[in-house]
Image (tube, helix red, strand yellow):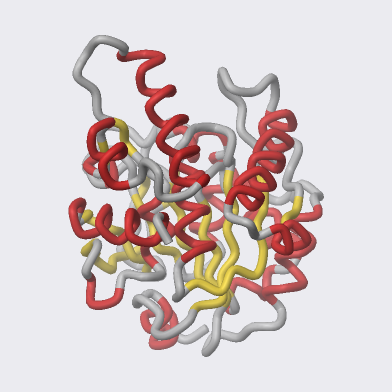
Amino acid sequence: MTETQLLKNLNVPEGTVDCVLDTDTYNEIDDQFALSLMMKHEKCSVRALYAAPFFNNNSTSPEDGMEKSYDEILNLLTLMEMEDKKSITYRGSRTYLPDEKTPVPSPAADHLCTLADEYSAEHPLYVVAIGAITNVASALLYNPRIADKIVIVWLGGHNKDWPDTKEFNMVQDIAAARVIFNSGAPVVQLPCMGVVSAFYTTKPELEYWLRGKNKLCDYLCDHTIEEAESYAAGRVWSRVIWDVTAAAWIINDGNRFMSSVIEPAPIPTYDGQYAFNPHRHFFRRVTHINRDALFGELFRVLAL
């Protein structure tokens, strides 16, 4: 891919966008919001949904996290009355990458390899990833030529000025993060602390805008409030809905919802930092979220 084409593909796409979503949906409640936004928004033509691995208190292993995420995707599709989209939902990796050269086989990685080959640098497939990026990295390792046919939009890592980059999505599979940042594919990064951490909501706001609109909205209200009050009952709380911001990059016409910069791609290191080389290929880093504008659009779409 030429530098001119790379820079073009780092811009917000125009018109309806062919995209896939790679998500650890059962990890926490924000994935459900992001998936719902993409499935319901008029600008997104979702070609596939991939379940990503995760391992924390909500799973017993990366494989268990992936399976629970797969089931949660199906649950959300039922709530949205999109039963037909279950046929484009794929299980992902059962482990993280063992190193930067060895892919992890999965239906998700296989499907992405095949699907991405239908696209080109001039008409790329947008790969929105909001979990450990193992599935996407595996697809790139299996089929490196798709680097010129996709644009990766990933919520992962912290802002470059944060003291470290030990963020959940990145630290689970640093090898996979290094694969995507070294692949030459256009990458749009949504950093967590220092940028996306400003995208939060509250119980009164959720109740006002979503309660009673439809089954999906009630589900999102109930589970967001339940999760927040599990650790903050009786206290003032707000809940970050991180993952929506990655999904929102596709619909960011006129930079309504976020601003960003283009700069040389960083290199995630195994000690929780970034290394920098001014001669590397370019990527885009989101620097600011217009919180009110984006929540306004999110609530509008979810209530449809």
| Most foreground residue, 225 or 160 | 225
Image spot of residue 66 (x, y percent): 69, 37
Image coordinates for residue 134, horizontal then vertical, percent: 64, 47
Residue 236 placement, left or right of 86 = left
Question: Which residue is depicted at the point 45% across and 75% down?
Answer: 43
Asked whether residue 280 appears in the rendered view, the answer is yes
Compared to 180, does 144 lie above or below?
below
Q: Nearer the viewer, residue 296 or 214?
A: 214
Q: Quadrant of residue 259?
A: bottom left
Image quadrant assignment for residue 254: bottom left
Q: From the top left corner, tell me how far across and down residue 142 is, in percent.
A: 76, 62
Q: Where is the C terminus found, in terms of image quarters?
A: bottom left
Q: Which residue ends up furthest to the front in the rendered image?
A: 212
Residue drawn at 38 percent across, 84 percent down: 8
In the image, residue 203 above or below residue 210: above
Give coordinates of residue 117: x percent, y percent: 71, 79
For image coordinates 54% across by 62% down, the residue present is 39
- Regarding residue 288, the answer to whether it shows in the image is no
* Near-viewer residue (178 or 63): 63
Q: Which residue sits at x=41%, y=69%?
A: 250
Above or below residue 121? Residue 209 is above
